[in-house]
Image (cartoon, rainbow, N blue to C red):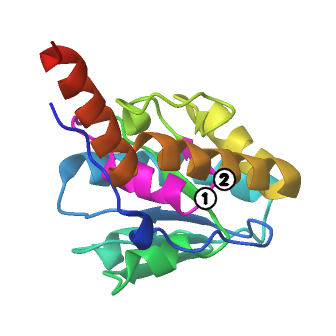
């Protein structure tokens, strides 16, 4: 099994500035994304807005059903964006509210590479062996999910430290050069006389 990797040249510059919004980036023609965003908007977002009434949520991804989400306050539907790295380069908290689904979480790895603080369900970071509270926050219920978002927006130092730790983790674990070195070392140890 070969892991997903990124070229060092693909990494965006690390984002500076306090996290000032929440964002989700994912295709809305995939049922787990639809379910996750519906759960987030119905159960998490009202709690965040109660504590942070000026907080904004940006939703991006292809096939976004704008009419379904127009009823929510402070929600901006961006639809399909030309440059996902540019979106992840803005100082926001990335959310991954997946309640079902499987496979490698490429958007999570890309968000970590961009140095974004992330709040996710455990399913959203499944297969990424980072540490909860250091590389991302894991929250599987609405109250915890909201509290973690609020915490990151209110605490610039924590958000910056988490984003930096996440980026360093991806550089060590998912950068193509590192993956090739580990693969070659494994081959050499397997076939060495």
Task: Name, please, the residue furthest toward the top.
Answer: 193
Q: CA distance from mark 1 to mark 2?
A: 5 Å
Q: Relative to 55, does residue 118 appear above or below in the rendering?
A: above
* SS at mark 1 in the image: loop
Residues 130 and 175: in front is: 175
Q: Residue 134, percent across and down?
A: 68, 34
Residue bounds of the magenta highlight:
100-119
**Circles 1 and 2: CB atoms closer than 8 Å:** yes
Q: Residue at x 34, y 30 (%)?
A: 127
Which mark sits nearer the N-terminus, 1 or 2? 1
User: Front-most of 45 and 26?
Assistant: 26
Q: Position of residue 21 (x, y in %)?
A: 67, 68
80 and 192: which one is in front?
A: 192
Point 81% across, 47% down: residue? 158
The residue wearing badge 1 is 116
Q: Specify the farthest residue to the bottom.
A: 82
Residue 42: image location, x then y, percent: 50, 49
Where disc 2 sits, the SS reads helix
| Residue 37 shows in the view | no
Q: Residues within 10 Å of mark 1 (few under 14, many from 20)?
A: many
- Up the image or down, 157 lies above or below 74; here it is above
Residue of label 2: 163
Q: Is residue 56 visible?
A: yes
Picture quadrant where residue 22 is located: bottom right
Q: Is residue 183 left or right of residue 39?
A: left
Q: Is residue 174 magenta?
A: no
Residue at image position (66%, 53%) is 163
Assess disc 2: are there few (<14), some (14-19) or many (≥20) residues with their C-alpha within 10 Å of its C-alpha.
many
- Magenta run includes residue 116: yes
């Amino acid at each position: 099994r070969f892991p997903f990797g990124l070229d060092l040249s693909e990494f965006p510059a690390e984002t500076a500035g306090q996290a000032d919004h929440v964002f989700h980036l994912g295709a809305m023609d995939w049922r787990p994304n639809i379910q996750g965003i519906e759960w987030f908007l119905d159960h998490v977002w009202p709690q965040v807005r109660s504590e942070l009434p000026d907080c904004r949520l940006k939703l991006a991804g292809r096939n976004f059903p704008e009419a379904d989400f127009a009823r929510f306050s402070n929600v901006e539907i961006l639809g399909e964006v030309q440059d996902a790295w540019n979106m992840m380069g803005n100082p926001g908290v990335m959310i991954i509210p997946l309640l079902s689904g499987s496979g490698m979480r490429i958007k999570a790895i890309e968000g970590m590479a961009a140095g974004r603080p992330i709040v996710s369900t455990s399913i959203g970071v499944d297969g990424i062996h980072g540490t909860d509270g250091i590389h991302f926050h894991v929250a599987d219920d609405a109250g915890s999910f909201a509290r973690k978002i609020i915490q990151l927006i209110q605490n610039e130092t924590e958000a910056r430290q988490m984003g930096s730790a996440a980026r360093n983790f991806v550089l060590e674990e998912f950068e193509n050069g590192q993956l090739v070195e580990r693969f070659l070392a494994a081959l050499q140890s397997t076939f060495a006389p």
